[in-house]
Amino acid sequence: MMTDDEIKQLIAKNAKAIEALSSSLAAEKQERQQKIIQWEKDRNQLYQYLSRIAAAQASFYEVQADYYHQLSILGDRQTQINEKQAQMQAQILQILQHMNLPTDPNIEE
């Protein structure tokens, strides 16, 4: 059988052990909370980066689409210029033929 002093010592020892365990659990809980907060910050930052990348891609595709549109417009203009030039050459040839002038300036009659 244990004496009162031994029981008191055992109770004090158990109380210290319980206090140490409680302190350890509280520290682990706080550390876990800090990790969760940091993880949430990292996740939010990642989403912000992904959002920026998506916006940059969208902007790039808009610029690219505009570039190809402008190339198409320039191609159409070039086609119109070529057609107009061909019409003018045909008209010049008709005028020269009507005036009985040589159509090739390198040929002498």
Image: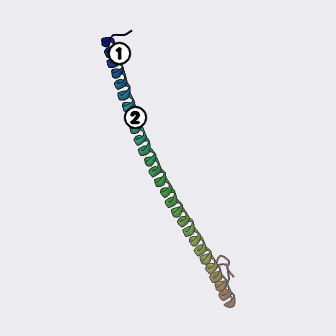
The Cα–Cα distance between marks 2 and 1, rounded to whole angstroms, is 28 Å
* Residue located at (47% from left, 50% from top): 47
Looking at numbered disc 1 in the image, what kind of residue is underneath it? Leu
Position in image of residue 97 (x %, y %): 69, 87
Indicate left or right for 72 with 24 as reference.
right
Q: Secondary structure at mark 1?
A: helix
Q: Which quarter of the figure has residue 65?
A: bottom right
Label 1 CA crowd tier, 10 Å (few <14, some 14–19, many 20+): few
Q: Which quarter of the figure has residue 34?
A: top left
Work out whether 77 lies above or below 25. below
Indicate left or right for 16 with 101 as reference.
left
Which residue does the numbered mark 2 point to in the structure image?
29
Quadrant in which the C terminus appears: bottom right
Residue 10: assigned label? 1
* Residue located at (47% from left, 54% from top): 51
Looking at numbered disc 2 in the image, what kind of residue is underneath it? Lys
